[in-house]
Amino acid sequence: MRIRFDDVLLIDGTGADPVLGSLLAADGLIAAVLPGGAGGADLPADTVIDGHGLALCPGFIDTHSHSDLVILANPMVWPKLRQGVTTELFGQDGISMAPLPPSHVGAWRKNLAGLEGVCGDIPWDHRDTAGYLALLEERGVGVNAGYLVPHGNVRMEAMGLDARPATDAELEAMCGVLARELEAGGMGLSTGLIYPPCTYADGREMAALCRVAAEHGAPLVIHQRSEADDVLGSMREVLAWGRETGVHVHFSHFKLCGVYNADKFGAMLGLLDAARAEGLDVTFDQYPYVAGSTMLSAILPPWAHAGGTDALLARLRDPAAREKILRDVQTFPCDWDNFVAFAGLDGIFVTAVQSAANGDAIGKSLVELGAMRGTTPLEAALDIIEQEENGVSMVDFYGMEEHVEGFMARPEMNVCTDGLMFGKPHPRAYGAFARVLGLYARERGVLTLREAVRKMTSQPARVFGIDRRGELRVGHHADLVLFDPARVRDVGDYTDPCRHPEGIELVMVNGVTAYGSARALGNERLAAAPSGAVLRRGRAGA
């Protein structure tokens, strides 16, 4: 199949000035890129798309995705495809699908439920990254899919879910597991140091694992210990690991939580500047909103999660332990990122549950939930976590718009969604990339259009070693997005988030049109079958 785009604004992903021209996609690859009047009409094609008034760029790369489980049930992942995402990286925050020892499957599914959802017909018989990637290939993927090796899974295989430092033997085992999983195609090491069991790791453990990642040329992708009160100490800790081991540090969903922490913003930028001056390889991704989203149980103190989800649920049922949890959540300041402190009970909203019995909680703040249940907001939160066996998600309003814009303008930044893909999600799952193009590039001028596209394409491809994607270059895979620069925008909000953006006219994955609008194709079309590839670091096509 040969598809030619004519009279289109070519934004090549490198940050270069856009130029009018033509592009030919053939046999899954970019076959020709012709700027200006270089004779595109001379290239034979089965389909010719008039790109007048439109822009064509490489497909967007979502470097922080939570489609790990959902994609097995719904391979096309329309919320991502319809905003131009053609590649996603799974395995985020240190807790995901593999490695997965058989003895831990039941507890681990509960642990993931608030972050990845529950898909009842998915087999959980894969044991490692190789098995998970093979399962993705067997079922098919609508987007290209890469996988980060999650620290929590590695730790679980080596030493279970204990809340303690690793012994020398356990740490040696962890390093062996991580090496095995990276050699199977993992594209980096991820951790989430607010999530169990990652949160129980000390600096010795993290440095050892970072050395293994660095030896394999893989980045550390990190939800740091604090994004709030101790964010500066947390950043210094992570940068020290980069300095000590040589690992590329990539901060996940970089942010500053709590309006009362605004005075730390300048110092955060200063740490980034100092790292660049020192020659450290440091980058980060960001979603363009002042609210985040994760599992509701993240509001609980780390000790409450020790031993896994079943142990957590037992504590919620024990009056003495429950009282201690309530007391710790309401004690400020504290030595952990306390969502209640920086978002407030009226700034945390339930977005997804697993049972119909608690369906009325979706969209309600914890204050509203407490009123509905005739109890305090925190008691109501603990009740619903217990009743749903940890399968509850939330949105939390954490920050300030000027900080979002300040981080976005940084050279280290690339765009991500961090979108949870079930329930009533955060609107970022449907609109993050279109929001950057429309609101922040066109309307506010925080970025130029070419720089916005670079941060969605070649920048993440470089960081994660994604070969032959991210640029409009002959021989690269034909992952393409055709959009209207004058019209593209996100339209979902926190009340009605599940709305596809406007102005995304066509999305192509490996030369196959996944989505095409009536403007681009004469009538709207959706691909009937997935055309994505499973990516493995260090392998051709990754």
Image: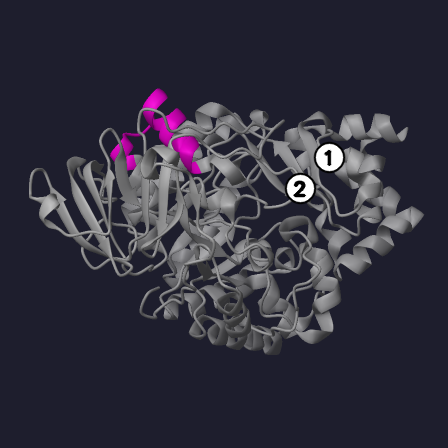
Residue 169 visible in the current orientation: yes
Label placed on residue 423: 2
Image x and y of residue 229, in percent: 58, 36
Label 2 residue SS: loop
Residue drawn at the location 24% of the way across and 53% of the way down: 25
Q: Which residues are magenta?
A: 433-451
Q: Residue furthest top?
A: 443
- Where, quadrant-wise, is the C terminus in this rendering? bottom left
Residue 480 is one of the magenta-drawn residues: no
| Number of other residues with Cα within 10 Å of mark 2, as a class: few under 14, some 14 to 19, many 20 or more | some
Cα distance between the residues tagged 2 and 1? 8 Å
Residue 353 drawn at (x, y percent): 74, 44
Q: Amino acid at mark 1?
A: Ile
Q: Quadrant of the N terminus?
A: bottom left
Occupied quadrant, residue 57: top left
Quick check: 381 left or right of 76?
A: right
Position of 347 with respect to 38 (left or right) is right
86 in relation to 442, above or below: below
Residue 218: which disc? none
Q: Amino acid at mark 2?
A: Gly
Decide which of tag 2 and tag 1 comes sooner along the chain: 1
Specify the label residue 362 is tagged with: 1
Residue 378's spot in the image, x, y percent?
81, 35
Would you call the spot at circle 1 few (<14 residues within 10 Å), some (14-19), or many (20 or more)?
some
Tell me what residue is drawn at x 15 percent, y 52 percent. Answer: 44
Query: Secondary structure under badge 1?
Result: loop
Q: CB atoms at circles 2 and 1 under 8 Å apart?
A: yes
Seen from the viewer's position, the closer of residues 541 and 51 is: 51
Identify which residue, 254 or 144, lies in the foreground: 144
